[in-house]
Image: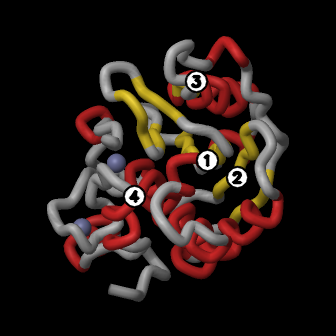
């Protein structure tokens, strides 16, 4: 499994973390979303809330694999951003889908960040892979993937260090190994406030 690389299309300037609207895409365990929000606030110091659900549409699915094409979710989030006023435009939207995702030319992905840098999506289904994916493990993996995508929105590319959250996971074991924290170099590059762990 590969993670889509969009860093070349993401502006390299530093961006402050913005308030985050967590968007349940399809049916998602609300307790898991709330836990993610609290974890993101604890780790990154960001404001968050859970927004209106985004229905998953059948035509977004790839016929053979049954995976949802993540770009459709990104586009739906971007439409919300364009339709909003004031604060809505200064918000990052992170859709969480209890589904598998795929991207054109890449295949299955854990998540994707939009080239405009305001919207991203994470799929929960691949996070259930491997052994021991109980509630706490799933929560930890979701946090890792969410921080990774938000790192892209903040302007971070992929990192060569396997212990850094910006390392591009190919397997769930990569995610478990790297965890949700930035290496010193990525953290310094992003100048993230409130990120204190190494
Ligand atoms: Zn990535
Ligand atoms: Zn790094």
Of the pair 158 and 104, the residue shown nearer to us: 104
Label 2 close to label 1 by CB (< 8 Å): yes
Q: Nearer the viewer, mark 4 or mark 1?
A: 4
Q: Earlier in the sequence, mark 2 or mark 1?
A: 2
Q: Which mark is residue 66?
A: 3
Q: Which mark is residue 62?
A: none
Residue at the spot of label 1: 94
Q: Residue furthest front?
A: 131
Q: Which mark is residue 22?
A: 2
Q: Residues within 10 Å of mark 2 (few under 14, many from 20)?
A: many
Residue 27 quadrant: top right
Respond yes or no on whether mark 2 lies under 8 Å from ligand 1: no
Q: Earlier in the sequence, mark 3 or mark 4?
A: 3
Q: Which mark is residue 172?
A: 4
Cα gap from disc 2 to disc 4, whole angstroms: 22 Å
Q: Ligand 2 quadrant?
A: bottom left
Report x, y in % for residue 135.
67, 71
Q: Earlier in the sequence, mark 4 or mark 1?
A: 1
Q: Nearer the viewer, mark 2 or mark 4?
A: 4
């Amino acid at each position: 499994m590969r993670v889509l690389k969009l860093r070349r299309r993401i502006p390299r300037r530093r961006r402050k973390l913005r308030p985050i609207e967590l968007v349940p895409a399809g049916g998602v365990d609300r307790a898991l979303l709330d836990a993610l929000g609290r974890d993101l606030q604890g780790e990154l110091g960001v404001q968050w809330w859970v927004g209106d659900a985004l229905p998953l549409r059948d035509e977004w699915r790839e016929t053979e694999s049954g995976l949802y094409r993540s770009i459709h979710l990104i586009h739906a989030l971007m439409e919300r951003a364009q339709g909003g006023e004031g604060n809505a435009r200064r918000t990052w939207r992170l859709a969480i889908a209890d589904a598998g995702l795929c991207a054109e030319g890449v295949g299955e992905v854990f998540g994707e960040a939009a080239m405009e840098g305001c919207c991203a999506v994470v799929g929960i289904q691949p996070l259930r892979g491997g052994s021991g994916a109980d509630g706490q493990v799933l929560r930890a993996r979701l946090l890792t993937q969410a921080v990774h995508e938000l790192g892209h929105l903040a302007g971070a590319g992929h990192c060569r260090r396997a212990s850094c959250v910006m390392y591009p996971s190919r397997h769930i074991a990569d995610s478990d190994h790297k965890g949700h924290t930035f290496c010193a170099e990525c953290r310094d590059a992003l100048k993230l406030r409130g990120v204190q762990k190494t």
